[in-house]
Image (cartoon, rainbow, N blue to C red):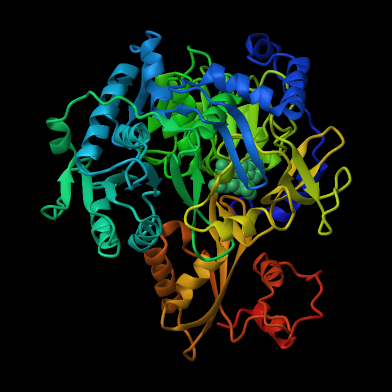
């Protein structure tokens, strides 16, 4: 596949390494910022590090409502930890009721725009009412504290309402991105033992209707634990409703009371699970808690986005990913923020949709992904130039590293050189942002997520577990527990311990490589495990391989990431087949097969047929070698001495079609 600008990304990585530009925060921004001096940051950072329990205890008392106060701030060590022990709180209460109690009920919570153009606004009072009603609906369907509710819905206010309704009664939501296939939904539903499914008749994507309910009908044939399915009417397409199992959202809501007090929940109660890719085939349900998670997202939102009541905050993620959980729903709403929520594609009806939205709604803070920024660059500046973006005061990125060229474009073209950029590094597992500039004080360097937030103590070690020197890359770990950290993998403690806590004992292993420069700035250098980051979405190579191997024609498959200017990484697969002379049609068939098994986001960009895969003598596929070949590198610099069959190398390069 060609890359849009023709630049091999390898040189971009080199660029990152050589980046020396520094952008100090604009003084007007600093003057009004929540954290407005380096000394203030230092004080917070040092206290959080050396008086961890005092620091977080004070914040938890100030920032969250407690039905019952906690007795201890922290107990445990390593992976077995508990925060705010003995206390009881509720995420939904902290996002809604506390604001009503402070007479903020008339403030707009959600400004929503559908892809076809409709608009809705919900005040905090209205949102509270809808959440209470839907929580009662869930109760009527038999949902109790600790039950899992699977959510597969379009980006409508009802998606946020559903999440908050679960949180209100202590039900655990498992939101599944509405681009996943029926197979993927069924896998997750089975793993989670989901009791109720929430979905919609369909969703709009680039002007077309995707029939969500059809996908769910298929998924539910393999989700034996699901007893009820609630269907939101969004697009009005024909759907089949199974009597007894399926119910229309509006029917259930019609006769329901809006009186539903939030259930006081122990601090460590599981608030949600969210499936993400790991280095084995099976997606893992990352488990987050109530109090610690809530405090983390509330506080990081306030620090990083410097939110003021006059702001309109727009995070362009989908609620199916952690970014949507933490910075569309729980972080902003805990801060009584006004958020913009957009349902559709950035290029519908035209490539200027985002800029049009910003201009019309006067968005002040934009939080998006590098992959989107690269697409905007490719679509052309004229789409941006048509619009007045002067309302913007702060920009953010998340999901993957941003290459300096894209950073500079974002800074100049979108930020008008006046908006700080916060490049936020974090993970599904961390719950919220871990490293990021503080917009009022941190001089930014394009491509660096800069420094850790208070409470985050990073450690970079080499293969021998020794701390690396300045500017040397190594495995990024977090050395001190923080309130937002994951508490487990749903139903698989052994995997949780093995994946995050074993390789570097006593530390949380992030799975990313990083280096720290002489200014104490961190530079993320990609994954150490077999995970590909496509358009900011984590995909495990083994999951893709398993999907391919489940096709009858395929004998063996290896998936690797290859640099791609637009998507960050593209998926290249090397496939050995059971038949002679595989055709080009088989490639299309395999793509369709992966689409069915996992979803469109996992469809390989390149498929190469080969008679054998390169393996070590012990039989391990040499992925690094395949990565180099997929990237079109001429000289394979790495050690091939363990390669079993040298002739394979030449064959692979020639792509034996
Ligand atoms: C990558 C998304 C560089 C990283 C919130 C991480 C980043 C993975 C950045 C988590 C960033 C995320 N710079 N890399 N600012 N943000 N990543 O779980 O590899 O979907 O481990 O969470 O994305 O992806 P996840």
Q: In the rendered image, is residue 535 in sight?
A: no
Picture layout, residue 399 above or below residue 291? below
Q: Position of residue 624 (x, y in %)?
A: 71, 68
Q: Is residue 283 left or right of residue 171?
A: right
- Residue 81 visible somewhere in the drawing: yes
Query: Where the N terminus falls, by quadrant?
Result: bottom right
Pick the residue in front: 627 or 246. 246
Q: Position of residue 454 (x, y in %)?
A: 69, 27
Ligand 1 lies in quarter: top right
Residue at position x 42%, y 40% from top? Answer: 319
Q: Residue at x 56, y 71 (%)?
A: 573
Residue 484 location in percent, x, y?
A: 57, 36
- Residue 410 sits in quarter: top right
Q: Quadrant of the C terminus?
A: bottom right
Residue found 74% across the figure and 36% down from its top: 457
Report the front residue among 472 and 222. Answer: 222
x, y percentage for residue 595?
Answer: 40, 64
Quick one: 492 or 599, which is closer to the camera? 492
């Amino acid at each position: 596949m060609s890359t849009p600008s023709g630049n091999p990304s390898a040189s971009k990585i080199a660029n990152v390494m050589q980046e020396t530009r520094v952008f100090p925060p604009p003084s007007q921004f600093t003057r009004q910022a929540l954290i407005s001096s380096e000394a203030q940051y230092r004080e917070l950072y040092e206290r959080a590090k050396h008086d961890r329990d005092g620091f977080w205890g004070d914040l938890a008392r100030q920032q969250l409502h407690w039905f019952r106060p906690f007795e201890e701030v922290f107990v445990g060590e390593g992976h077995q930890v508990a925060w705010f022990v003995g206390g009881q709180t509720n995420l939904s209460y902290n996002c809604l009721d506390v604001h009503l109690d402070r007479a903020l009920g008339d403030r707009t919570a959600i400004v929503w725009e559908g892809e076809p153009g409709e608009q809705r606004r919900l005040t905090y009072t209205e949102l509270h009412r809808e959440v209470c009603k839907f929580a009662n609906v869930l109760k009527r369907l038999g949902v109790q504290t600790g039950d899992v509710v699977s959510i597969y819905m379009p980006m409508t206010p009802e998606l946020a309402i559903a999440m908050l309704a679960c949180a209100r009664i202590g039900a655990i939501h498992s939101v599944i991105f509405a681009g996943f296939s029926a197979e993927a939904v069924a896998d997750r539903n089975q793993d989670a033992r989901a009791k109720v499914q929430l979905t919609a008749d369909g969703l709009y994507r680039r002007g077309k209707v995707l029939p969500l309910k059809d996908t769910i009908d298929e998924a539910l044939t393999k989700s034996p634990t699901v007893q009820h399915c609630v269907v939101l009417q969004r697009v009005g397409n024909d759907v089949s409703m199974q009597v007894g199992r399926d119910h229309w959202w509006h029917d259930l809501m019609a006769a329901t009371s809006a009186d539903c007090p939030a259930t006081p929940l122990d601090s460590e109660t599981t608030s949600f699970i969210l499936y993400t890719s790991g280095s084995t085939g099976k997606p893992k349900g990352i488990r987050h808690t109530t109090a610690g998670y809530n405090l983390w997202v509330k506080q990081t939102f306030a620090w990083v986005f410097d939110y003021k009541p006059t702001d309109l905050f727009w995070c362009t993620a989908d609620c199916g990913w952690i970014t949507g959980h933490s910075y569309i729903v729980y972080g902003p709403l805990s801060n009584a923020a006004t958020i913009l929520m957009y349902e559709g594609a950035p290029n519908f009806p035209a490539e200027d949709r985002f800029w049009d939205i910003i201009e019309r709604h006067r968005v002040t803070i934009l939080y998006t992904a590098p992959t989107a920024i690269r697409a905007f660059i490719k679509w052309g500046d004229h789409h941006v130039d048509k619009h007045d973006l002067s309302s913007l005061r702060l920009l953010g990125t998340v999901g993957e590293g941003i290459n300096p060229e894209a950073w500079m474009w974002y800074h100049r073209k979108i930020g008008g050189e006046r908006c700080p950029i916060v490049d936020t590094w974090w993970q599904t597992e961390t719950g919220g942002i871990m490293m990021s500039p503080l917009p009022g004080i941190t001089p930014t360097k394009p491509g660096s997520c800069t420094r850790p937030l208070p409470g985050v103590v990073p450690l970079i070690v080499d293969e021998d577990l020794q701390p690396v020197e300045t500017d040397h890359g190594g495995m990024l770990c977090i050395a001190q527990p923080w309130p937002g950290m994951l508490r487990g993998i749903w139903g698989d403690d052994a995997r949780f311990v093995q994946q995050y806590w074993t390789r570097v004992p006593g530390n949380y292993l992030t799975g990313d490589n990083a280096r720290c420069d002489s200014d104490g700035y961190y530079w993320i250098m990609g994954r150490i495990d077999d995970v590909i980051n496509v358009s900011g979405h984590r995909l495990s190579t083994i999951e893709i391989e398993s999907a391919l191997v489940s096709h009858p024609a395929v004998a063996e498959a290896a998936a690797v990431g290859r640099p791609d200017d637009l998507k960050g990484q593209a998926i290249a697969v090397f496939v050995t087949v059971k038949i002679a002379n595989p055709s080009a049609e088989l490639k299309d068939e395999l793509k369709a097969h992966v689409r069915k098994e996992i979803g469109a986001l996992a469809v390989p960009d390149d498929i190469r047929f080969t008679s054998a895969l390169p393996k070590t003598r012990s039989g391990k596929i040499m992925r690094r070698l395949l990565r180099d070949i997929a990237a079109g590198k001429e000289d394979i610099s790495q050690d091939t001495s363990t390669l079993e069959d040298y002739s394979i190398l030449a064959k692979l390069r020639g792509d034996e079609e």
